[in-house]
Amino acid sequence: MKKIQLDTNFSLSRIVHGQMRMREWNMNPRQLLAMMNELVELGVTTFDHADIYGGYYCESLLGEVFKLDKSLRDKVEIVTKCGIKVISDRFPDLKVKHYDYSREHILKSAELSLKGFGTDRIDLLLLHRPAPYFDPAEVAEAFTQLKQQGKVLHFGVSNFTPGQFEMLQGFLDMNLVTNQIEVSPYCLEHFENGNMDFFLKTGIHPMAWSPVAGGRLMSPWDGKGPRIMPVIRQVAEELGTDDVEKVIYAWLLKHPTQILPVVGSGKMQRIKSAVAGLQLDMSLEQWYMIYVAALGKELP
């Protein structure tokens, strides 16, 4: 599988495996290891985490896998996120969920992630969400220290607008290498808020979380999903497949920003559908058929 270069000497697999629900898959470490090895054989070498996933537990689950096979760590890229604090065993005295991007918290979060993974470096650390209370100078200090120590190799953000991205970038001597955002035929937010144009302008390749809209497409419960899915099925028929997930991924993968979908499933067949989306030759008109169905009206 082709990798996408995000920075000098740094690339991620075109399909990323999201491990947010790893705790829910009810697999023991040996079962997870077998799955991780199968992913690597498919070319899916990038694993996406956040400190908060699984109640601040999923990072250590992957760490248990690395203990079983230390060679696996050098075959994959670890992405994780920090910044969200919720009332939990890790923060039992919190009174309210909030975002913390203080220098101290970023450094401590990185240390806890390194310990959970059982590794000496994180390939890519993202700020999980933009925050109304945000000091970019403190963030820059934390990023610089982690980079100099070799504990984090690259940095990015998640769910940021173009203005928020540029604001933070202005305080840094290193490049922010990606922005992980929600993109799917169900969610067109970042086509409308200027992010897609910003990515094209800057050469940023976005990661896409919830690429099949978390069930809102496959098992729709509102009017939008039933409006979009018949068109996706029509395109699937035209492309000679009955796998609608493959078509959804092909729609994302066709975009010139070179989107990296994050596939958050513990089922290999669903991951293989995403990988197979790379082989579908979707036409521009078919891409727009899906876009217009998602938009709910003709283009101007």
Image: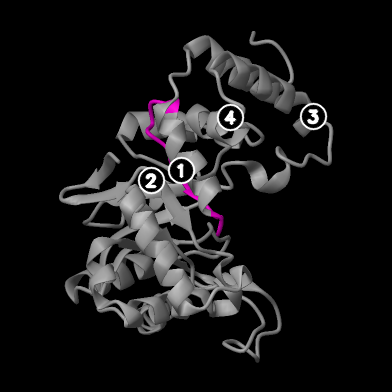
- Quadrant of the snapshot with the C terminus: top right
* Depth order, front residue of 154/161: 154
Q: Which mark is residue 166?
A: 2
Amino acid type, callout 3: Pro
Mark-to-mark CA distance, 3 and 4: 22 Å
Which type of secondary structure does the marked residue at label 3 adopt? helix
Of callouts 3 and 2, the N-terminal one: 2
Does the magenta stretch mainly form a helix, a strand or a loop?
loop
Residue 290 in percent (x, y) is at 62, 21
Q: Which mark is residue 192?
A: 4
Badge 1 crowding class, 10 Å Cα cut-off, few under 14, some 14 to 19, many 20 or more, is: few
Q: Nearer the viewer, mark 2 or mark 4?
A: 4
Is there CB contact under 8 Å for labels 1 and 2? yes
- Quadrant of the snapshot with the N terminus: top left
Is there CB contact under 8 Å for labels 3 and 4? no
Q: Which residue is mark 3?
A: 226
Of callouts 4 and 1, the N-terminal one: 1
| Residue depicted at x 31% and y 35% | 202
Which type of secondary structure does the marked residue at label 1 adopt? helix
Of callouts 3 and 4, the N-terminal one: 4
